[in-house]
Amino acid sequence: MQPTTEPVVTVETAKSLGLTSEEFDRIVEIMGRTPNFTELSIFSVMWSEHCSYKNSIRWLKTLPREGARLLVGAGEENAGLVDIGDGLACAFKIESHNHPSAIEPYQGAATGVGGIHRDIFTMGARPICSLNSLRFGKIESNHTKHLVDGVVRGIGDYGNCFGVPTVGGEVYFNECYNQNILVNAMSVGVVRVGETVSACADGPGNPVFIVGSRTGKDGIHGATFASADLTEDSAEDLPAVQVGDPFQEKLLLEASLEAIQTGAIVGMQDMGAAGITCSTSEMSAKSETGMRIDLDRVPTRQDNMHPFEILLSESQERMLIVGHKGQEEKLFAVFDKWDLECEQIGEVTASGRLEFFHHGEKVADVPAEPLVLGGGAPVYEREYRRPAYFDRIEAFDQDDIPEPADFPATARRLLESPNLVSKRWIYEQYDSMVRTNSMGTNAPSDAALVRLKESDKCLAVTTDCNSAYVFADPYRGAMIAVAEAARNIVCSGGEPVAITNCLNFGNPYNPEVYWQFVHAIQGMGEACRRFDTPVTGGNVSFYNQSVFKDRTEPVYPTPTIGMLGVVDDPSWQTSLSFKGAGDRIYLLGQAYDDLGSSEYLQFVHGERYSPVPHFDLEEEFALQQTVKKLIRAGLLASAHDVSEGGLFVALLEKAMSGALGFQIETDPAFRKDAYLFGESQSRVVVSVSAEREEAFLTMLGQHGTPYRLLGSVGGAGLQIDGEDYGQLAGWKREFDESLGRHLTH
């Protein structure tokens, strides 16, 4: 059964494909014989970390997976699905494309966007918006500028051509990402309840189709590439990076949604990581069936492709469809209308095995279930131990940090941080208005608001993670990531519903990295349970570290949260902008003498090792409940959470957005730099009109929420404790233009 042109399989062959000797022995046991090279290649990609989650699933299962609105939970389909009311459901998911983007930033980022959108419309949902979460190295580096340029163009070009608006995201710069950048893409789609499609292969005898683009040699062993460290030689793995075509994806979207309406589809799955191998095995295992596939019938872009190349190719814009026997012509007609390939390549069987044929010869015969997550794929719990750098964090003494002699100058210095200034240079390259669902362009809110044309409701969506917090304390840092996402949605008028996550960490075989991972999962789970935001799925991305001849550099642990919220009443939509001169400015929540892990401490003082900012989960939950009630009572003119850059940056952003200055007084009970620039959590800055102030204060008293009157809105400048901080126009010009100057010079 093994073609003579294939390598002879040994344990060394298995190791070259990323498998261990123990895993090779297990494969031989499952097969009852030594696999041939094609079969071994199938196991190698399906048992890679990227596909099997073998080093993470033990802990992922501890995350909350149930909720009142949840229709499809984690691992059940290509994306999570939640009920958003009015007969509608929302499918959403976030995934990484880190390694490909570090090697070839334009195509790596573009195909990351395309892949996550396919996960959504494969379920029958139409994507209505996308978000992203990006991490780059030192902004002064020419290499960083090259990567930023490629990634931003890749995201923008693919999304703009595909016709789905990019409505939100986050961008951070830190030297730990100098070589191994993070590119996380999120897609959000809407479908009517009951009109979704499952990734199943029910019904022996039903035909199996491949639709969309032809299969090429791009992306072969891409899943294995994503499951290994980046090294100085990783550029040699460039063929593992896929090439995307957004116009083809647009055709595939429309054709797929139309094909679903014919009733001729049994199941459908995107061909992402591991291509035909993954889609055939996962669909078969889910239905406890098998497939017989003729690889000669797969449309290819190159001649003389080997069977393993056809099976493992990650060429983009392809889907696997199982149709109802006897209704094949309906599918052919739809895909012919959209000028797309639709080729029957096999049929469903009752064998539970995947049988692949090439030139009339059976080139692979493997059982489906042992290939997949939850079947026979290996599951590990790695050793973990407290990171040694925690000693430096615990030795930090805030009293060693001198208070500024000149606060206006220090504030201006802080606003030189690329992590705090406007990302206008980036987001202006994205089309945020296509399909006319986006809201808040002129009055931005903490979360992006997206209109539902079929309903009076709108969605509130956000991506959040401050990786410096997670580096300082993975448990509390991950809790903060969830809490900040929820806070952003609440401040925008929404109710948090569920999350998807993208867990970016270093090598799981490093005990200190695995310690970060385990504790981040535990903190995330506790916060999600408190906010009743179940985890609907996502992505684990290990091996985010650069290996050089003399050192290894893991990235900061970065468990990115993509959160979905619903704004049930249009009158609840709340922006962050100051609205009227004379409005009163209040700080809700308790202030603390806390500089821990703040951008001020890191950027102005160069202090990398300090504790996580103050955070108490119950304080946070109570604050968010109060803010929701204030918004629903119509008592707030604006709301904006205090996060990176502290109170000063929150006030500045409100002023710039509303084109109105402010006059405030700090609380002398605290260090002034901690009060203005510290990032202690669970704080929200609101503005209130004079006529609503009494009712506002009454409600705060009823709920026992800590608050402080800061000052008032008005004028063209900024004034703090009677000191002039300059004109708002100058701050806004610097805020808007700073990043562009960094990246283009």
Image (spheres, rainbow, N blue to C red):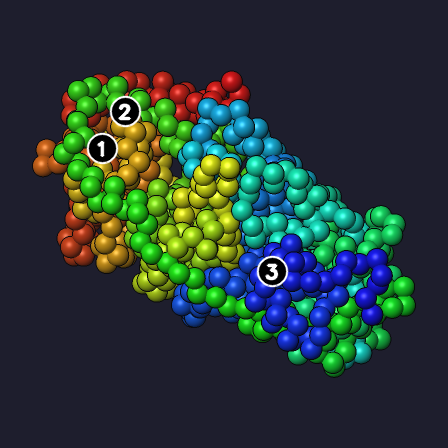
What amino acid is labelled 3 in the image? Leu
Q: Tell me which corner region of the image, top left, top right, bottom left or bottom right, holds residue 431.
A: top right
**Residue under pointer 2:** 411
Q: Residue 92's x, y, as percent? A: 54, 57
Residue depicted at 20% across the width and 19% down the height: 406
> What is the spatial separation of the Cα atoms under label 2 and label 3, in whole angstroms?
52 Å
Q: Which-is-in-front pick, marks 2 and 3?
A: 3
Q: Tell me which corner region of the image, top left, top right, bottom left or bottom right, holds residue 584.
A: top left
SS at mark 3 in the image: loop
Dot 1 or dot 3, earlier in sequence: 3
Residue depicted at 18% across the width and 57% down the height: 703
Task: Please identify the residue farthest to the left as the structure is shown.
Answer: 669
Position of 267 with respect to 460 (left or right) is right
Residue depicted at 58% across the width and 61% down the height: 20
Between 504 and 159, the residue placed more toward the observer is: 504
SS at mark 1 in the image: helix
Position of 473 with respect to 79 (left or right) is left
Q: Can the viewer see residue 231?
A: yes
> What is the spatial separation of the Cα atoms under label 1 and label 3, in whole angstroms?
52 Å
> What is the spatial separation of the Cα atoms under label 1 and label 2, in whole angstroms?
9 Å
Dot 2 or dot 3, earlier in sequence: 3
**Residue under pointer 3:** 19
What amino acid is labelled 2 in the image? Ala
When the figure is inspected, residue 251 is found, relative to residue 670, above or below; the finding is below
What amino acid is labelled 1 in the image? Leu
Instruction: Find residue 676 and name its label.
Output: 1
Q: Can the viewer see residue 482?
A: no
Residue depicted at 54% across the width and 68% down the height: 378
Dot 1 or dot 2, earlier in sequence: 2
